[in-house]
Amino acid sequence: MQLPAADPAIVSRRAAIVGALREIVPDGVIAEDTALRAYESDGLSALRQMPLVVVLPRTTEQVARILSYCRRDGVKIVPRGAGTSLSGGSTPLGDAVTLAMGRFNRILEVDLDNRCAVVQPGVTNLAISRAVESDGFYYAPDPSSQIACSIGGNVAENAGGVHCLKYGLTANNLLGLEMVLMTGEVIRLGGRHLDAPGYDLMGVVTGSEGLLGVITEVTVRLLRRPETARAVLMGFEDPGQAAACVAAIIAAGIIPAGLEMMDGPAIRAAEDFVHAGYPTEAGALLICELDGPAVEVDALIARVESLARANGATTLRTSTTEAERLLFWAGRKAAFPAAGRISPDYLCMDGTIPRRRLPEVLARMQDLSRLHGLRVANVFHAGDGNLHPLILFDANRPGELERAEAFGADILRLCVEVGGVLTGEHGVGLEKRDLMPVMFGEEDIRQQQRIKCAFDPDHLLNPGKVYPTLHRCAELGRLHVSGGHLPFPDLPRF
Ligand SMILES: Cc1cc2nc3c(=O)[nH]c(=O)nc-3n(C[C@H](O)[C@H](O)[C@H](O)COP(=O)(O)OP(=O)(O)OC[C@H]3O[C@@H](n4cnc5c(N)ncnc54)[C@H](O)[C@@H]3O)c2cc1C
């Protein structure tokens, strides 16, 4: 992983850029070294560098003025929510303005008649559910980082979470967006209705990792809280049995609210940390949550328990109280910080595979672990095949970070090889950028880049992220001379 090199021509204009931003947001420009330090990285903390400057607008109009200024003067921009990206999506660039959306932190409207909420992008994911819980509603996608991550960042990464197996990812829980384009124009996509004519541009923007525009308002779908939720905790001797049990639950037509797996190292680290009562001798643990009307949940739990027994579960416990259900989840939710207790550093990978390849992929990951000489702990969304291997290493030992990165890249190649994809929910960012050609052919990538060009022809938004090399838009246009007609003949060719 490498940070894109800073353009000295932009860095030399820093004072003028800071001055222009101060004119637009007089009380929201950070240019002093000590204060900038807080923005030097995101959740991918192995990569860090100081941003050129940080600006914290409060209004859509200020965002529009910042973007039009940057476009006019050729200044790059890195949009930033809460900075929890694990793929380096909001990693700052030394020659770019970090546009931090933390002051867009208001819930603008709760509209229960239409089962939606209109919020600013800096509102945290959890704050939305908290705002409507007394009315019996919630916002379903629940990334483990939900206490900190912003809804704007969730949209830009198409974030997922434990409950997405049943209720869908961010994309499935989004109704509308307001977004500012690089031209300074403000567009609205979707709304409170269920569908809209024309291209599904909201689908294009969701998961676009800050490359197409800056989101300034989000309308999310609210769901009624289920009457009951109970969890089943299942321990197995080996991950293959647990994987077979996952397949059996899904094949039985049961759609759990969550179906998560942890392997032996992850179980023991989490148990030492939160004392959730996990079986520390087990080689794999499943937590399966069922929700809905009590009578339905009871029936589903009986079926899940019987499938667990049939697949060799050595531990089988079902929550009888809400406190017990939360305790089952406490270890899973604390698994990432718990990994910090067994290793000074770790890389959290994110790839997705077809569920039926789980046993094979987990076994081959152990081979890779031996090959690279590094331990790996697995905590993941087993129900939707979304793996989160935690590669344990010590950055103070020369060469270990590079070995961890190479191990991570091999895991992602393996995911693609078995018919999966490079990311399930954390995005591509800087972390997986150079692996995009493993997944996509040149034509696929060019077509994606043409969409980028339509929104941001000068490549000023989040440059260096997602695409290994971004062809200049005019070069892409040159490829499509048809019938002697050159598209965009007024554009300079390189
Ligand atoms: C401990 C931990 C656990 C995590 N667990 C999960 C999990 O379970 N599921 C999951 O999906 N993710 C998880 N993540 C990753 C991360 O929290 C998500 O990717 C989240 O969506 C990022 O939100 P953010 O506000 O921090 O965005 P940032 O990190 O600030 O930015 C992420 C991307 O969004 C863009 N962006 C941010 N705001 C805007 C905006 N307003 N307009 C346009 N672009 C914008 C940025 O340019 C960047 O590309 C976890 C992270 C941590 C640290």
Image (tube, rainbow, N blue to C red):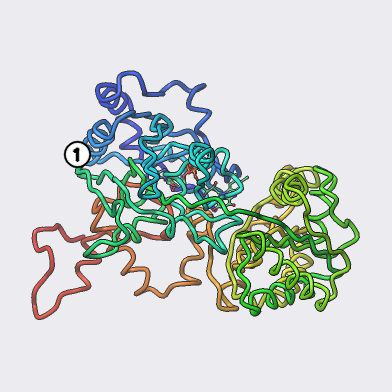
Q: Position of residue 464 (x, y in %)?
A: 41, 51
Above-or-below relation of 123 to 354: above
Would you say residue 58 is visible in this rendering? yes
The residue under label 1 is 72
- Residue at position x 49%, y 47% in the image: 3
Identity of the residue furthest to the front in this view = 295
Q: Give the secondary structure at mark 1.
A: helix
Q: Position of residue 278 (x, y in %)?
A: 84, 54
Residue located at (38% from left, 29% from top): 56
Residue lying furthest right in this view?
A: 281
Q: In the rendered image, which quarter contains the C terminus?
A: bottom left
**Residue 39 relative to residue 112: left or right:** right
Task: Give the residue type that dot 1 points to.
Answer: Arg
Q: Position of residue 419 (x, y in %)?
A: 56, 78
Residue 407 appears in the picture as rendered: no
Give the image location of residue 180, x and y in percent: 26, 43
